[in-house]
Amino acid sequence: MAEKITKEMNIMDIVQTCPESVAVFQKYGLGCIGCAAAHFENLEAGAKVHGFDPDEMVAEINAIIENNSVEDDNK
């Protein structure tokens, strides 16, 4: 199973760990991949500066990881 994501993790580390997380960032209107801050800012700071709940975002990304893990186990 892939590593669980935390709100303390750097945004680019999250994207590298779980490329599918880009869809979550886009859902919340965060163009994090093109933002210079993504290289040093953690998810919590990025979410809060844009007015979003970081715990909600983490839960959505970890759900993607869990779903992908289950799909891989079923192959």
Image (tube, grey):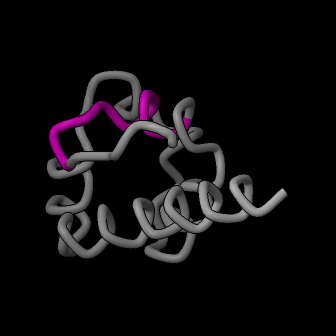
Q: In the rendered image, which quarter is residue 14 located in?
A: top left
Quadrant for the C terminus in the image? bottom right
Count of numbered marks? 0
In the displayed structure, 10 sits above or below 53; it is above
55 shown above or below 6: below
Q: Would you say 40 lies left or right of 17 here?
A: left
Residue at left offset 50%, top offset 62%: 66
- Residue 11 magenta-drawn? yes
- In the depicted view, which residue is nearer to us: 29 or 8? 8
- Near-viewer residue (75 or 16): 75
Q: Which region shows up in magenta? A: 7-15
Image coordinates for residue 37, horizontal then vertical, percent:
35, 32
Residues 4 and 45: in front is 4
Q: Residue furthest right?
A: 75
Q: Position of residue 2 (x, y in %)?
A: 50, 39
* Residue 69 is covered by the magenta coloring: no
Q: Judge whether 51 appears above or below 35 on screen.
A: below
Q: Which residue is painted at 39% across and 23% down in the image?
A: 39
At 58% from the left and 68% from the top, the residue drawn is 67
Name the residue at the top extreme: 40
Q: Is residue 71 above or below residue 72?
A: below
Residue 57 x %, y %: 33, 68
**Residue 31: % across, % down:** 53, 54
Q: Nearer the viewer, residue 23 or 29?
A: 23
